[in-house]
Image (cartoon, helix red, strand yellow):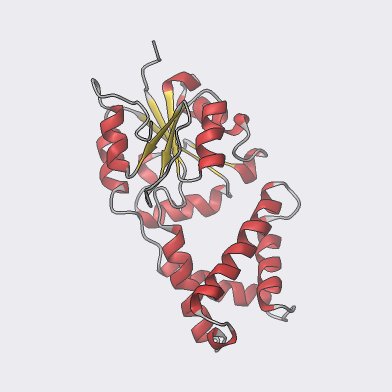
Amino acid sequence: MADEIRGVLFDIDDTLFDYTSSERTGLLGHLAAEGLLESFPSPEEAVALWRGIMEEEYTRFLRGELSFEEQRMVRVRRFLGRAIPDQEAWFGRYSALVTKAWAAFPDAAPVLEALAPHFKLGVVSNSSLQHQRTKLTTLGLLDHFGEAIVCSHEYGRAKPHPEIFLAGCELLGLPPGQVAYVGDKYDVDALGARAAGLRAFWLDRVGGSAVQEEGVTVIGSLEELVAALSPGRSTGDRAG
């Protein structure tokens, strides 16, 4: 018989927080303000280029090849195709517009409030602690987690490495078999959590997934997580 789930660990970006939308809004607003938007074939191609560079350079940060600030500067150079004197200021203006667009998903706060009386809650994130605590504070979600937040920058291991998931379980004071993990990235979040012995939930907000992996429960919203963790409700895979 599977262990009773007593704790839930969450990813943040594109799980609790609509990172993709805020990034797009901030980037296009920034390019328009800088007079650069027409330098790209279309707004969507500009977003795709920025996002592709971000994924590559952020992966280097997670591997320890770049600091958090260095990966930001490399992204600016690659995106613009040249070095500019005020790269830090350029990124700062972009970041300010992204921050202005920050928003939690509508289901985030209600679900955390519903879970809090019954489960210990925490966060495991591939980012820096200061950045994510600032984000959670701005979104009004930090109080749900307290000090139970582990981030790869400070911890020294990034998802999908099992150790960072286990570190999150330790913060909750629970064994991995009694902890669920919820994230939007299938390989990094769902498979990483499963490998570490946690109950893995993959949040697929877009839908249409054909994933049928044993030990991975697919949910389309955080409301489905509440239903899956409720006593007497099945936690079987939605997709098979």
Residue 130 position (above or below residue 169): below
Residue at point 54%, 34% (across, down):
191
The quadrant the N terminus occupies is top left
Q: Is residue 54 left or right of residue 143?
A: right
- Is residue 150 shown to the viewer in this render? no
Residue 51 location (% of width, % of height): 57, 64
Q: Is residue 218 left or right of residue 118?
A: right
Residue 110 placement: quadrant: top left
Q: Is residue 214 left or right of residue 119?
A: right
Residue 129 position (above or below residue 145): below
Residue 138 position (above or below residue 74): above
- Is residue 103 shown to the viewer in this render? yes
Residue 69 location (% of width, % of height): 67, 61
Residue at point 36%, 43% (across, down):
143
Residue nearest the observer in this picture, 115 or 53:
53
The quadrant the C terminus occupies is top left
Residue 27 location (% of width, % of height): 51, 73
